[in-house]
Image (cartoon, rainbow, N blue to C red):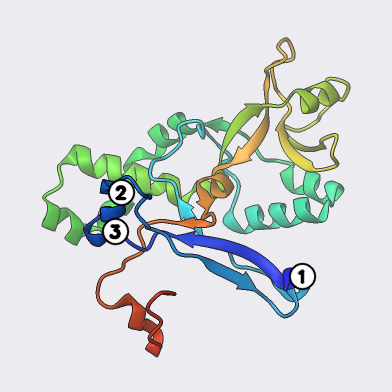
Amino acid sequence: ERENFINTIIPEMSNASGNKIKHAIKGKKFPKLKEYILLYAKDKNQINLTIPKQAKEKWDKEYNQIIPELTLQSFERIIELIDDKKINELDKMLTGLSLVSLSEFIKSNEKVIIDEWVSSHLSVISENKLTAEQISEQAISDWKWNNAYRIVASKPNKALRKKALKLDFKQPIQSLTNPSGDIKIILTDFNRETETARIELAFAEINSSIYIGDIWFKITTTGGVAQEGGVNFTNGK
């Protein structure tokens, strides 16, 4: 029933080929490529979906600053405090954190980054005959993804800027609530002369992947998909 309904998911289950394109050739209808998954629950108030995320293919260059002192454990705690809206405790955790250029940080630590990557990827280097340039690029790329929890981008936020202009700050990174009551992390040393000042900090760890939506592409249909799971369900798999 409607009160038990959660989602409709549309998977792409076939390719536009074979018998499916006959109607298209005749101008009668589009080729049928999709199926429907209707998601229901006996009590949807008790349901907590684990919605998968997919990593972005390339590193977003907007994420060009790093908080060197931040550990993964501290990052996770900061996110908890933001969700729980514990501003005082959050600002204590942000005390002592600094913000530096990602490119400068990598430049200063490049040898260590590459050496650590090489030591754990000797077989990959040998099998693929990687050049020194390729090794450097891959080592730095992997390092960025592994350190996404402490890499940030700064972006404009007019509402936060307006509020911050009236306040005095004693640390480089601090929390501030927006008009909706949500807690944001800000750079306190922002440009106060422009309305488009980059004041809000966004963590790469949170934004380096995107949630998979309700349209699923590239579902493998070869090899008897209708019989998977031990149940023959020709038109429903």
In the depicted structure, whether residue 32 falls above or below residue 227 = above
Mark 1 or 2: in front is: 2
Which residue carries the number 3 mark?
A: 20
Q: Residue furthest top?
A: 193
| Percent coordinates x, y for residue 107 in the rendering | 39, 32
The amino acid type found where label 1 is placed reads Glu
| Percent coordinates x, y for residue 50 in the rendering | 59, 67
**Mark sitting earlier along the chain (1/2):** 1
| Percent coordinates x, y for residue 154 in the rendering | 61, 30
Label 1 and label 2: CA atoms lie apart by 38 Å
Direction from residue 37 to residue 46 in the image, left or right: right
For residue 7, what is the image quadrant?
bottom right
Q: State yes or no: discs 1 and 2 in contact (Cβ < 8 Å).
A: no
The residue at the point 50 percent across, 65 percent down is 36
For residue 80, what is the image quadrant?
bottom right
Q: Secondary structure at mark 1?
A: helix
Q: Is residue 31 visible?
A: yes
Given residues 111 and 38, the one toward you in this image is 38
Q: State yes or no: discs 2 and 3 in contact (Cβ < 8 Å).
A: yes
The residue at the point 40 percent across, 39 percent down is 109
* Image quarter in which the N terminus is found: bottom right
Mark 1 or 3: in front is: 3
The residue at the point 76 percent across, 33 percent down is 171
Which residue carries the number 1 mark?
A: 3
